[in-house]
Amino acid sequence: MTPEVLLSGYSPTGQTLVFRVYAAEIPEAERKQAHRAEHFAALELLSAALQKDFSVSHARIHRTGLEKPCLLHGFLHFSISHCRGLAVCAAGRLPIGIDAEPPRAVKEHLLGKVCTPEEAAQITAAADSAREFSRFWTLKEAYAKYTGAGIRTPFDTLGFSLENGIRFLHPDAEKLQFYQLTRGGTHTVSVCLPRFAGSDGK
């Protein structure tokens, strides 16, 4: 598998790669096997990315209970995500979280469960409510993966504003930076990591 680079971040000198975000299209599998096939595709993408950019072969992932998965290479962090048609991963020298989703149909009961009232109003008013919901959802997922809390995080307490860029309405906001990309004109990819002095670009 050849990783497609979506985003890169470098040290202030531009000499050291701090983080990189990768993607790969994956064929759709039978419904019963889809999640498993997507998960293995994401792991294969991570393996290829680590070898290509960080010279790490045969990476091993360790996880204890509900703790955040980590690599048994102390200087590297990673996060993976997969959904219908796409696998993504992020790897680097800082903690990181990533999520990807195609446009998701908006169900009213889900809006109240995972969105703030302001977010729900913005999604409902949007011309493409499914895409707008995916934008908020992936940001919340990326943050939850960054912290390691995952689905234990109450999403309705994580407020975002998308009117003028991405603003995180949370006490952690000053410590973090978020990126959001559209891949293939369909999938939304969101990334969360600590703020650092450096540059980013493909």
Image (spheres, rainbow, N blue to C red):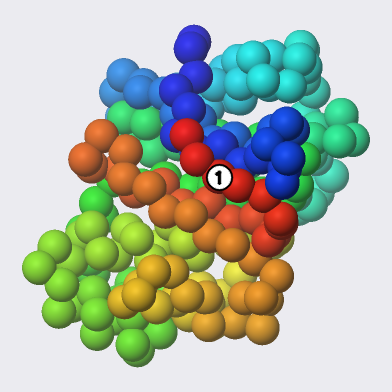
Q: Is residue 93 above or below residue 154?
A: above
Q: Residue at x 65, y 66 (%)?
A: 176
Disc 1 residue crowd, few under 14, some 14–19, many 20+, Cα 10 Å: some
Q: Residue at x 70, y 70 (%)?
A: 175
Q: Residue furthest bottom?
A: 117
Q: Residue furthest front?
A: 13
- Element type where label 1 sits in the image: strand
Could you say where residue 116 lies in the image, as x and y percent from the top left?
40, 84
Q: Quadrant of residue 80?
A: top right
Q: Quadrant of residue 108?
A: bottom left
Horizontal placement of 163 versus 129: left or right?
right
Amino acid type, mark 1: Asp
Q: Is residue 130 above or below residue 34?
A: below
Residue closest to the eye, 177 or 76? 177
Q: Residue at x 33, y 87 (%)?
A: 118
Residue closest to the eye, 67 or 128? 128
For mark 1, what is the residue?
A: 200
Q: Is residue 28 above or below residue 7?
A: above
Could you say where residue 202 lies in the image, as x and y percent from the top left?
47, 34
State the count of labels: 1
Q: Residue at x 15, y 72 (%)?
A: 126
Horizontal placement of 104 versus 37: left or right?
left
Residue closest to the eye, 167 or 82? 167
- Asked whether residue 80 appears in the rendered view, the answer is no
